[in-house]
Image (spheres, coloured by chain):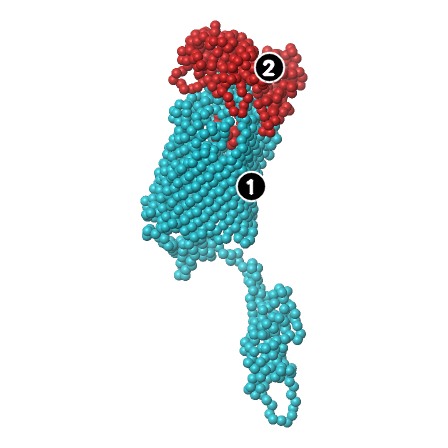
Amino acid sequence: MRMRTGLRVTRRSLGRLVTLGAGLAALAVGIACGTNFEPASLVDSVRILATQADHPYATPGQTVSLQMLAYDGRVIQPEPMKVWWLPFVCINPIDDLYYDCFAGLAADGGIAPDSGLGAPDGGAPPPLLKPGVDLTPLLIEGTKFSLTLPANIISAHATKPNIEPYGLAIAFNIACAGHVEAVPVDPTSDNPIQIPIGCFDKNEIKLDPSAYVIGFTRVYAYTTWTNNNPVIQQVTFDGGAVPDSGLTVPHCTASKLQDCQAYSLDTVVPSSSDEVDPSDLGPNGMPRNEEIWVDYFTTQGALDDDARLLYDPVQGQITSTATKYHAPQAPGPAVLWAVVHDNRDGTSWQQIPVTVQ
Amino acid sequence: MRARALFTFGALGALAAVSAVAGPLAAQEPPPSGNAIPSGASGAAVTTKQIEAPPAPVITPPVLDHFENAVYPKDALDAGLKAEVVLVLDIDVTGKVTKATVPEPAGHGFDEAAIAAAGKFVFQPAKRDGKPIAARIKYKYNFTFEVAPPPPVPAAKLPQKTLLGRVLSASNGATVAGVSILVRLPDGTERATTTDEAGAWSFVDLPPGKYHVVIASGGFVGQSSDEEIVPGQATSVTYRLAVDSSGDEVTVKGQRPPREVTRITLTADEMNRIPGTNGDAIRSIQNLPGVARTLTGLLIVRGSAPQDTQIFVDGTPIPYVYHLFGLSSVVPTEMLDKLDFFPGNFSTQYGRALGGIVDVSLRDPKQDTIHAMVQADLIDVRAVVEGPLGKGWSFAAAGRRSWIDVWLKPVLESTGTGVSTAPVYYDYQAMLEKQWSKNESLRFLFFGSDDRLDIVVKSVDSSDPSLTGGISSHEYFWRMQARYRNKISNDTEVKVTGAFGEDGIDFALGSDYLTIKEYPLSLRAEVSQRIAQGITANIGTDTLVIPYNVTARFPPFPVAGQPPGGPFLSAPALTSQSTGSNTLPAAYAELELTPWRGARIVPGVRLDYASTSQTFDLAPRIVVRQDIHGGYPRTTMKGGVGLFYEPPQPQDVDKVFGQPGLTSNRGIQYDVGVEQEFTRNIEASLEGFYKQLDNLVTAGYFNEGRGKVIGLETLIRYKPSKRFFGWVAYTLSRATREDPPDFVERLYEYDQTHILTVLGSYKLGRGWEFGARFRLVSGNLYTPSTYGFYDENAGSYLAIPAYPPNGQRLPLFHQLDLRVDKTWKFSHGREFGIYLDVQNVYNRANAEGVSFNFNSTANTYANGLPFLPSLGLRGVF
């Protein structure tokens, strides 16, 4: 749940508003907002849950392989979900803004030569994305995608003071329970963010957000800095390791899901995964380690927390990281995921089948 | 012969009668007259024998002509001792006592006292056959006293003020000192007094009845009035004198006439009693015209951002005014004398602000005796002690500590949040003052504030994982201030305020942090000199020097017009470390002119320098007030125009986070208005204002920002009387900005079109007081969002904000707050009070923002405070 108020961080009021905003945010996060929104952890629509790069930090000229985790959690699926990657990679968008990647798209779908959009292999720009045309033949279907970083990706990026030089590549993907078409840019709108593609059903009707997700993944390029994806040592359920065959739980007989029996759910990430972050020199100039957290998702049942902190740059390894899983009221198959992130774009996940008796 | 002296002992009212009883002793030979013992020419005793001889001489003894009362020895009197002292006195032919001795000392000081008194006796000399001769006599001096029973002292014997009040100037409400108040009693007798520096006057022990009161003062039109004193009650009256417009300038003693278009002063009494503010002084400002309503109490004055309004404590700027989350301001109301609020077009003595000015004045310590106050409510506990130190010195010390951490910590921990330091705040004030006279004083003031929290948020908000992990904040400041004031003469006044201190911020959020240490030095000095009739010059300096040390690690801030490109803390962070000093000297000069009847013109100019921009800013200003009708009821037209600057903040020009080369934000402010008295207590003001802003610092675009604010403010005020105060304030305004890159005029994020506040507080008697406040305010602006992209690195959805931003408005805000006080008063100034302050009485669900679900496909209003009672206890000793 997010709340938009008048409080935000601005350069001119940094000290006081950051303090106030953080304090309020902390309370907002720590205390229930009192809303009845469905939790982010419940997968009941088309969702992209994560994307993993084999090299979260890559070097210029290196080829990076991306793997996407997507799932269609809809109960009724008129059309099956498919996943595609857009056939271009955005290199060094202005101010590192993902939506500036589309600034080079013209109203007719043409791509400006200096748009920063290149082919995944670093070659010539892709074909035109004309509105109203099924882009399926142009898109790269599947959960895997590879991109090669240009050799000048770091030198071509605008330098910033007091920061390790880097380059940025952004790949876009879409999980869509239909087909993908280009959406014309609205020439009358000044909104910098305009989504250039959409998901449509067989009748050319644009699908609602439950049927599609448009995502993007950033890959940073550094000369020497590296980053490994965090390792999930194990996921524990009710105090024991989750077996390879998955979990079996009785269905809940209580009238309210929150009154169902709760099982402790935890993810163990070894301290070796909590790498030193060379960009994070604390106030005393000493390097600190990464922040690592775990997102949980489930197709059935409920979780007390959508995500839990595992490692903090200041606090170190966090104690009491477990959350609670409440079994669903209806028997049947379910899926549970634990997706671990570090704050340097490293990702890992574990998918757990659940049989609800 | 008996002498009696009276001594009265203070409160006991006992009477002691001291009598020195003196009387010559009987001689061994029967004295021919009086009580003398003849002793011959040398004073020796003479015996006679019977011989046949010539007839015996006729001898008359000395006769006491002048008796001198002896001083009863104090120690003996205290010990209750009495005595008989036998003196031997040598008396010469003139009757003077040449020698006095005590053959048998009585001790305890009696002998010395008797000798001293006897030495001043004057006798008619002894005579032999009619011829004066020297003589020696014995004289007994009795020291004795009687203790009279103390008369009964009825309680009503202590002086009671039964007729009292104040005298104010009708033209501007300033107090008038030195006014003659004459009261004619029913029996025709008269009593007189004069008003003091506060314009106050009083008569004690006037019995119930009707009185004719005559008020007269040079330079003012005299008045007379009939008043009545009702049994069991005191009668309080405020007289407002019109200036005697004979062409002479009148200097009003007491509060100076305003040097700005609008100055609203709130007294400590008002600040303490406004419902819904929990007695907080700064929160009370939100009820004034031109001030927007905010949830946290931040001051948005005439459409300006909170950081554009400066807050001063007795002329010294402070870095922030509220404790954590805006719960309470950093200076407790109990220490305040008054609060001056200038919404705009203020005097050249203030600068470096495009918004408003708030100057809180701490009151002088009480000087009669030691006093103490303790108060506790749901948020904090506070204590004050003050009193005289002797030789014109007095002191006050106060402290406050929140105790929300006591109940908030378990609440946070129940949600899984780790708590190292639950949110807690302190503030403290210590004052030492020396008053040489009512015109000259020196004050030392040490004050400060400290806010801290340290928590670990373990439950990550998946919509923004950046707001997780360790969140710690320690924000503090302290100042050591010295203030000297001297009204050298009616024409000359000097004020100097200097301060040094420390400001600090230690903030951390995950791996990002901000550490700031500043050591500000401030000096404000002003000389006011009456140059000629109708012309007074004010010349001053307002200088700041701020050495600093800053270390920060944060992602780059968004450029104007750019929606966020991800969760705030997801971009590569920048690091900055800098040490330096900001120097901001300023000088100003202004004239206060009264060229014709009812007119007051104040032109001035201020010159600022800012080391952050290395530029000089020259700001001319002028304020004009003209009484259309100077007497009661007064009508005054007012207006002003001026140039105002606000230098860039240090972080604005930081070489990593900011934009080096910035110049000052600039604004031209126009004001025009009218003030109208309706009754002695009711007055109204209507004021239109227009602010034209340019050269505004804009992220990514240097000084290219522009803006406008236009508005109309209305205030109908019932000035504090014995029982009631209140006002109705309404503001209609519109604040817009033209920011790059497109420079399209849009509503500014702090715009609030309608702001209506109605409040009042009434003393019911017997210590009961009831107050209410109703507010009706336009909803705040917000930016709607729609379903957007999924950021796979952060694992969160990024909504697409509507463009332009701030295009929608939340529903109308309205709320009723009530307050009930009950105070019990005891002897010696002691009192105990309890109050109940209830905010949002009818539990209105006022939207303060919009909450979105994780992918912005659903939203609902996020409501502010619900029905919220706050109970407080207060003891004064």
Q: Colour of chain B?
A: cyan
Q: Nearer the viewer, residue B5 or B252?
A: B252
> What is the CA distance from the residue labelled 2 to the residue labelled 1?
53 Å
Residue B350 quadrant = top left
> What's the residue type where badge 1 is placed?
Tyr
- Label 2 marks a residue whose chain is A
Q: Which chain is red?
A: A
Residue under numbered circle 1? B428
The answer to whether marks 2 and 1 sit on the same chain is no
Q: Are marks 2 and 1 in contact (CB under 8 Å)?
A: no
Location of residue A271 in the rendering, given as x and y in whole percent from the top left corner: 65, 20
Q: Identify the residue at image location x=58%, y=32%.
A: B453
Element assignment for label 1 = strand
Q: Identify the residue at image location x=40%, y=58%.
A: B184
Disc 2 crowd, CA 10 A, few/some/many (<14, 14-19, 20+): many
- Residue A268 badge: none
Location of residue B81 in the rendering, given as x and y in whole percent from the top left corner: 64, 67
Residue under numbered circle 2? A349
- Label 1 marks a residue whose chain is B
Q: Identify the residue at image location x=52%, y=29%.
A: A18
Tell me: residue B540, above or below residue B392: above
Q: Nearer the viewer, residue A102 or A356?
A: A102
Location of residue B519 in the rendering, given as x and y in whole percent from the top left corner: 54, 38
> What's the residue type where badge 2 is placed?
Trp
Q: Identify the residue at image location x=54%, y=54%.
A: B391
In the rendered image, the quadrant that contains the N terminus of chain B is: bottom right
Element assignment for label 2 = strand
Disc 1 crowd, CA 10 A, few/some/many (<14, 14-19, 20+): many
Location of residue B16 in the rendering, given as x and y in whole percent from the top left corner: 58, 65
Q: Nearer the viewer, residue B583 or B817?
A: B583
